[in-house]
């Protein structure tokens, strides 16, 4: 299974959060930390963003769980 790295514009689009909110939540340990891609480039592991989104949905809808795809 290949690890997919998402850059900031894609993370912003998927989460609906602004850049400043993403980095604020990272500093509060409420959002996945980015990985260094060298130089000044960073990205986020796609599966960690997907997990974070599922947790946000689960916490906002008690008793409701998001089915996760199982990759083989």
Image (tube, rainbow, N blue to C red):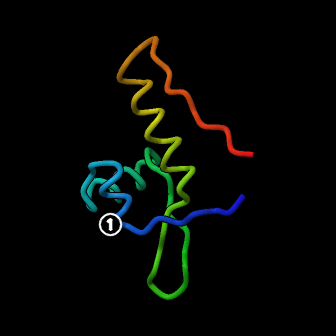
The correct choice, above or below, for 54 with respect to 1 in the image is above
The correct choice, above or below, for 72 with respect to 5 in the image is above
Determine the residue located farthest toward the front in the rendered image.
72
Q: What residue appears at the point 55 percent right and 50 percent down from the top-left corner?
A: 48
Q: Residues within 10 Å of mark 1 (few under 14, many from 20)?
A: few
Query: Where is the N terminus found, in terms of image quarters?
Result: bottom right
Kindly indicate the quadrant of the structure image that contains residue 11: bottom left
Determine the residue located farthest toward the right in the rendered image.
72
> What residue does disc 1 label?
9
Residue 3, how many percent across, how many down?
64, 62
SS state under label 1? helix
Kindly indicate the quadrant of the structure image that contains residue 38: bottom right
The correct choice, above or below, for 35 with respect to 41 in the image is above
Q: What residue appears at the point 28 percent right and 62 percent down from the top-left corner?
A: 19
Residue 18, how many percent across, how many down?
24, 57
Q: What residue appears at the point 68 percent right and 63 percent down from the top-left corner?
A: 2
Residue 66, how many percent across, how many down?
49, 27
Residue 10, how many percent across, how many down?
36, 62
């Amino acid at each position: 299974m290949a690890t997919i790295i998402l850059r900031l514009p894609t993370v912003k689009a998927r989460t609906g959060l602004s850049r400043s909110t993403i980095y604020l939540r990272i500093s509060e340990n409420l959002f996945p930390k980015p990985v260094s891609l060298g130089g000044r480039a960073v990205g986020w592991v796609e599966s960690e963003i997907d997990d974070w989104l599922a947790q946000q949905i689960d916490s906002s809808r008690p008793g409701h769980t998001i089915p996760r795809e199982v990759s083989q």
